[in-house]
Amino acid sequence: MGKYLFDNKGQAAITKFYEKNKPEKFDKKQQVKALREKMLKNKKNTDK
């Protein structure tokens, strides 16, 4: 933590902050599935 030292309470607050602000994991399978469903919907709408 560099030159700053925190007690247990401060360390817990920092850990909680970083867990809350951590970006979600990138799930390629879910993204591909969502894009495929979107494409199929668009295809159905344009076929009519």
Image: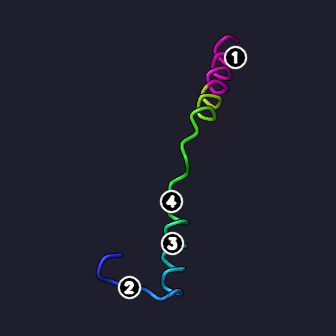
Q: Main secondary structure of the magenta part?
A: helix
Assign a secondary structure to mark 4: loop
Query: Please, what is the three-letter code of the amino acid marked with disc 1?
Result: Lys
Could you say where residue 31 lies in the image, as x and y percent from the top left?
59, 34
Mark 1 or mark 3, which has the lower sequence index?
3
First in residue order: circle 3 vs circle 2:
2
Front tag of 3 and 2: 2
Residue 44 or residue 17, whichever sits in front: 17
Distance Cα–Cα, label 4 vs label 2: 22 Å
Q: Which residue is tagged 4?
A: 22
The residue lying toward the viewer, choosing from 43 and 14, is 14
Q: The magenta stretch spans which residues?
A: 36-48
Residue 38 magenta: yes
Instruction: Specify few, some or many for label 2: CA neighbours under 10 Å numbering under 14, 14-19, or 20 or more.
Output: few
The N terminus - image quarter: bottom left
Q: Secondary structure at mark 2?
A: loop
Q: Determine the secondary structure under disc 1.
A: helix
- Image quadrant containing the C terminus: top right
Q: Is residue 14 magenta?
A: no
User: Front-most of 32 and 35?
Assistant: 32
For image coordinates 64% across by 16% down, the residue present is 43
Report which residue position mark 3 lands on: 17
Q: Earlier in the sequence, mark 4 or mark 2?
A: 2
The residue to which callout 1 is attached is 44
Residue matched to label 2: 5
Q: Residue at x 67, y 20 (%)?
A: 40
Gap between marks 3 and 2 measured at Cα? 17 Å
